[in-house]
Image: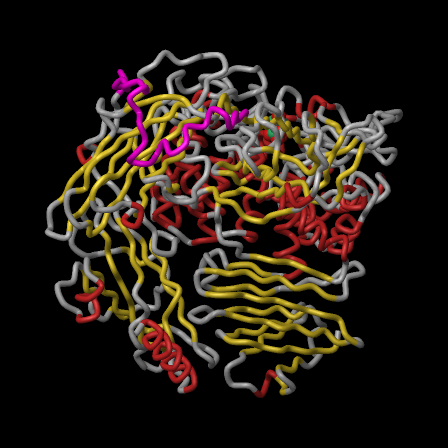
Amino acid sequence: MQKLVLLCLIFFSFFAGALGQTQVNSLLCENRINPTCVDISQPLLSWQLSGNRRNIRQSAYELRVSTSSKLLNQGKELTWNSGKVTADQSVHVVYGGSPLSSGKKYFWQVRIWDDKGQASGWSPVAEWQMGLLQPGDWKASWIEPGFIQDSISRPSPLFRKTFQAGKKIQSATAYITARGMYEARINGQRVGDALLTPGWTSYRKRLQYQQYDVTNLLRQGANAIGVTLGVGWYSGYLVWENSKNHFGSRTGLLFQLNIQYTDGTEEVITSDNSWRSSTGSILNSEIYHGETIDARKEKEGWSDPGYDDHAWSGVQLSSDNNKSILIATINEPVRKHEQFKPVRIFTTPAGEKVMDFGQNLVGWVQVQIKGRAGDSIVLQHAEVLDNKGNFYTENLRRAQQKNTYIFKGNGTELFEPHFTFQGFRYVKITGFNGELNPDNFTAFALYSDMPATGDFSCSNQLINQLQHNIQWGQRGNFLDVPTDCPQRDERLGWTGDAQAFFRTAAYNRQVNNFFAKWLKDVAADQRSDGSVPFLVPNVLGDQSMGSAGWSDVATIVPWNMYLAYADKRLLEQQYPSMKAWVEYMHKQSPQDLWNTGFHFGDWLFYHPDDDLDGRAAITDKYLIAQCFYAHSTQLLINAAQVLGKTADIAEYTPLLQRIKAAFLKEYVTPNGRLVSSSQTAYVLALNFDMLPESLREQAALRLVENIKSYNNHLTTGFLGTPYLCHVLSRFGHLDMAYTLLLQDTYPSWLYPVKMGATTIWERWDGEKPDHTFENAGMNSFNHYAYGAIGDWMYRVTAGIDTKEDAPGYRQIIIRPRPGGSLTQATGTLQTYYGQIKSSWQLQNGQFVLDVEIPANTTATVYMPVKSGNAIMESGKAVSEQKDIRLVSSDKEQSLEIGSGKYHFTAAQ
Ligand code: RAM
């Protein structure tokens, strides 16, 4: 029967497609496919149009929502029927039906009318499930183990509960969270596949719970629930000072299972004082240090109903039973992704057994091997080998990154950790005397499960490897929060790194829910005077705040989120946080000059090894602060314009002028020379429009001169680097931007690539040409900040961008800018509307450009050819094509197009 329905569907869509009918698909609720755990009273709904002709637009839509998929199809008893709405909006349509209820599932579909007024069929049915909307919906109590916990090694507690399901089960939903991390089982089977749950938030103010459909794990009759906890971010070691218990010292569990029986009755099973507790095989588990598992201590069958738990302890109710801070999880969970086998197992000169997985990744190694009872196998993790080829862990500082598995000795045993992760390419094995076979070891990459959206490739293989490294830097550092690095005793949500990399991140993956969640923590951890922490979640305390370029995350990420995803609701929600941060700077700046306080400055800018002529590329920290003060104020004004906050526009526009005037007075000579003659100083002044028009051209020339004086090398740090090539290409120095991009001696983007890097390094010269290392105190080989060049590769080389006044790629810009020795480049981007593609090549004096524009959008395509050179599309002159509008000027030629695929050619 199912097969028949599927066949009919395939036939129908083929038929509809052949008829040229527009179809609707890819339905998203709150940016996700069929999400559970929605606690928003008016979720946002989006869909895509497709069809096989050009210029598809939506002229109207109709949405319907129901609590039953059957009734939905019949159009009966609808929770919402939007009726036919004349609008071209297909993204972030606000649910407008009757109030949504806690825990309920909703089914929905949409049909549209296209630009010809032709109706599509109804889309396939999608669904979402609400979370628990009121604190009172939580019937469960927070529980802790009933035994005295070992506060030093902290074995993972086990919790257990059995119950009878007296009737036939219709559906069952589990709501789970923990102080610490949890892994839950029902009747011996794991609940869901999310890892490191409940994820990391500012736990004192916001704690996420997850929601699982567990209908299939339950059965009529006896059932058992088993949950184990780790200390995780909640009370594990965090920050380099070897401190733990940042959010509390007592781990705990909150568990609720809502069962619907087929007879319409409901039963709720909750964590309470009837549960049992004990310990099992996890002797300790720390994010930085790894996990120790003693398989001999495993309590076999401990989450099955038949297990005998009479020797277990009871549990205690937590003294803190607060449920008011619980929030639904909106971002994608951390899951297992790529798998790697060792590409090489070898003995180092120091005599150690090491395996190389070929990729610096973040996750863990699963071991499947035989051993004798009581023997152990110890895995230590490192990113690099030293210049002698030995296993190198000094740059991990205090993080041990060590997993120890003790065998129980009955055949092949499978081990992997639960509440930790490692950053590594190399694994050293000790304690195991048997032969090491690659089959016994599998490395899994773990990261937040955000859909991949972008790709970039070109004719230069080193740049392609750079793109690979950027993407792996993102995978490894997007584990529920954006971190600086994933391996040493840090792994923290550094705000400066996140803002620097945001735009690149939003090309590579759909990061809106990931960052929407984190931005709420940014706002939650903002101090009452508006200052923003260096880290979010903030585990450094109330004094570690207010650095230029770090705290500006509060304005830079929301604004750039708006450009990438056009979600006004998010901008509105973040607006108070954006404004508070600008107000904070305002208060620090009596003469409109922000020249006080601590700043990281242009972090890790280039210091020559032999600083003989004193030319380290230092940029005055207050000059930087003033530039970011202006930038944040500008972004606040932008947001106020979008949100119609006229009073704020009137207030901040003159403030911005005064900030720029104060900058000119303090940091710029009358002839336009900046007091810091560094690349970053010129880059920031130009990128943030700090200079009057009349001084810009010569400032750009000074920047170029500076680069030349370093023999065509960059010297910028975390703050200058993201904008460096953008400033060069914007001010007419595209050639220099390409020279920097293609430079391969350090400092440069390709130097690490040439040294064999598989991720982005924290420092330009993390490993020197002689294979010695930079200062081990701060030398990560997986730090995404310098990967911010990815944004330029997508936006300038491939040329994919959005118009700022039609953001979220509603109106697309395709403006490829070939340069350097590149002969070909391709960028693709999955947007809410569908795929954008810009792929160019230089072929016998011709510029060839293949473009793909999704339905319900339009694009302006800029051809980088001399005006007057005739542009052809699929072999016909564009001037003769009705649906392409050519705008030609002395400077450039552009084409206005609608959706579809295009093949443009023109003489260069
Ligand atoms: C380092 C981190 C991070 C940076 C801060 C200032 O410890 O690696 O990248 O933002 O310092």
- The answer to whether 791 is drawn above or below residue 897 in the figure is above
Residue 908, x across and y down, in percent: 75, 73
Residue 621, x across and y down, in percent: 64, 26
The single residue placed furthest to the front in the displayed view is 410
Q: Along the line of sight, which residue is nearer the eye, 3 or 303? A: 303
Residue 129, x across and y down, in percent: 27, 50
- Is residue 671 visible to the viewer in this orientation of the structure? no
- The answer to whether 557 is drawn above or below residue 290 in the figure is below
Residue 465, x across and y down, in percent: 72, 51
Q: Along the line of sight, which residue is nearer the eye, 344 or 446? A: 344
197 sits left or right of 144 in the view: right
Q: Main secondary structure of the magenta part?
A: loop
- The answer to whether 97 is drawn above or below residue 370 in the figure is below
Residue 433 falls inside the magenta stretch: no
Which quarter holds ligand 1?
Answer: top right
What residue is at 42 percent from the left and 70 percent from the top? 856
Q: Which residues are magenta?
A: 292-320
Residue 301 falls inside the magenta stretch: yes
Quadrant of residue 76 within the rendered picture = bottom left
519 sits left or right of 692 in the view: left
Quadrant of residue 306 within the rendered picture = top left
- The answer to whether 528 is drawn above or below residue 839 in the figure is above
Query: In the rendered image, which quarter contains the N terminus?
Result: bottom left
- Is residue 224 visible to the viewer in this orientation of the structure? yes
164 sits left or right of 500 in the view: left
